[in-house]
Image (cartoon, rainbow, N blue to C red):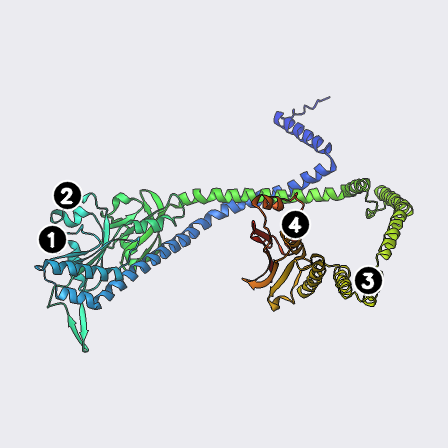
Amino acid sequence: MNSVILPLPDKDEVNLHAKMKRSWFFVKRRSFRSKLLISYALLVLIPISIMGTKYYYASKGFIEKFTRENLYSIVKQNNEIIDAELSKIEDNSLAMIGDPVLYEQYLNANPRDEYGMVTMEKNVRKALEKYLPESSQLYSYHLLTSYSNIGNSAFITYQTFSHTKLYQAALAGNGAMRWVPTFSFQDMFGAFGQESSTSSSYPNLMAGVRMLKLFQINNNAISELSGIAEPPVLVITFKPEMYTARFESTMPSDGASFFIVSPQGTFISGSDSEQEGKDFKPPWLEQMKRLKTGAIKVEQDGKALIICFDTSEVTGWISGIIVSPNMLIDTFMPQITSYTIYLGLALLLVSLILAFFFAESITRPINQLIKAIKKTGDGDFGTRVPIRAYDEMGHLIRKYNQMNEKINSLIEENYIVKLREKETQIMSLNIQLNPHFLYNTLNMMNWTALENNQKELSRMIVSLSSMLQYTSENHQDIGEFHEDLKWLHNYFYIIDQRFEGKFIVQYDINPELYPYTVPKLFLQPFVENAIIHGFAHIHRGGIIQISGYMIDGKRCFTVQDNGKGISSKQMKLILKRDNNSIGIQNVDKRIKLIYGESFGVTLHSEVNKGTTVNIVLPL
């Protein structure tokens, strides 16, 4: 009999099978909620991983196109902004040609008249300041002739200016503005300028120059300065930093660089500031001059480069940004990778939250029952748990609801019955204090006083009845001001009967205040304090002044007396919250509760001079 020899399983296959078995056993031991969370996580992670990989490789193809469009828009926008600034300077310099002050000063200039030259310099400088106001972009400006240099700087020597390239550019322009690329002091002025030791103190500069062919119009006739007197040359200088500041703030990545170059190949400004004023003639300069604007892809030193450029409409200089596509990929791809990872994590988090809420829906009835039992323990026997299922949990909730109903029945039979007994007692007390009973009694007293010819007593009873009616029938905290003032009149009448002419009351009330509402009896505590405390040691001559007026959108009321006043020590005690001045505190607190903290009561008093109470309310 032949035996069959089976191949032994590979060691790696055995290990893999063991790992899968352990993983499956681990999953089987988890709770239902954990299984849901794991399932949701896998359902999200697998498609996200596949889509993220495809998205990563597809994104590389779009980066270069996006870079071209983005960098080109940056260059174009920066060029337009700088062109707008330079165009404004060109327009202002062109406006100088017809300036009558400049024409008269240079027409009548006499270099031999020292005093006249000082006066001329002041007038010309004032005119320059009108056309060339101070700007962070300008470094200096000059009006140069063979006999003067007028401007905000003197670093250009007028005696040798005619030997410089700036002067030659102005002559070539023949009245038009010419822009001179970046130059150093030594290169521009050389042996004609100041000493070489001082030239290092001046930065690299670029300039705009224009021969000002000044003219004047007299009786519709144009008189030109040329041919009569020497026309001045306008020189406006700038630092290359005006380009640097603009481009560096808008560069898309650390690996990008920018440049501004003249069509003749002079490096004007750029990321490499050491090249300013030097020759810059890369092989792709001619292509940029021909195209004027756009984006090209070149190769330099074996590396691919993307160059986005644009030509200035004002200066003719070419601005550009250079960036390596590989560097862009290194810059943006980590962001894309991070975005993919974060998106996957976000979706995973959302899926786990959904799984959590799904699992929570299973245990929610238990949690609701626990919360309901806690409320019952706190005394809320009206709590009911809605029955959403008819299983064992539903049966348990039903029994809990029945228990609460029985507890409520016991409360109705015991506690609520006692409350009703209390309400009955309160109602009986209210009946005893019925205002009608009180008014009828006062009315009987009034008729009795009239029968006995007690007219003063009768009027006091009527005043008291009116006061009680105002305070008892209207239970609101506020009332109309004219009603409150009427109550105060009655109060004064009754008090005056007691003190027999000890004081008089004067009123100064704006009639427009009568329709407004006020806190009820808000003046009474202050009037009472004036009578009882302010006039305590006098027998006659007391005066109470009550004023009401409107100012700055507020209603202001004043209660002023000429009593003995309050000392500073007593005032501090009154203003404390634990003092006995309940009436003052009550009014102030009521006003703040009704109208806000910015309104209320303030007191001012001087010993032997009297007290003034100010009450401020809104309109």
Residue under numbered circle 4: 585
Residue under numbered circle 1: 160
The Cα–Cα distance between marks 4 and 1, rounded to whole angstroms, is 89 Å
Nearer-the-camera pick, 281 or 548: 548
Q: Which one is earlier in the sequence, the residue at label 2 or at label 4?
A: 2
The Cα–Cα distance between marks 3 and 4, rounded to whole angstroms, is 32 Å
The Cα–Cα distance between marks 2 and 3, rounded to whole angstroms, is 114 Å
Q: Which one is earlier in the sequence, the residue at label 4 or at label 1?
A: 1
Of the residues tagged 2 and 3, which is closer to the observer? 3
Q: Which quarter of the rendering shows the N terminus? A: top right
Residue 332 placement (x, y as % from top left): 46, 45
Residue 300 placement (x, y as % from top left): 31, 45
Sort mark 4 into few (<14), some (14-19) or many (20+) by Cα contacts within 10 Å: many
Q: Which mark is residue 196?
A: 2
Q: Is residue 1 left or right of residue 190?
A: right
Q: Hey, what amino acid is under mark 4?
A: Gln
Residue found farthest to the left: 112
What SS does tag 4 mark?
helix
Q: Quadrant of residue 166?
A: bottom left
Q: Hey, what amino acid is under mark 2?
A: Ser
Of the residues tagged 3 and 4, which is closer to the observer? 3
Sort mark 1 into few (<14), some (14-19) or many (20+) by Cα contacts within 10 Å: some
Q: Hey, what amino acid is under mark 1?
A: Thr
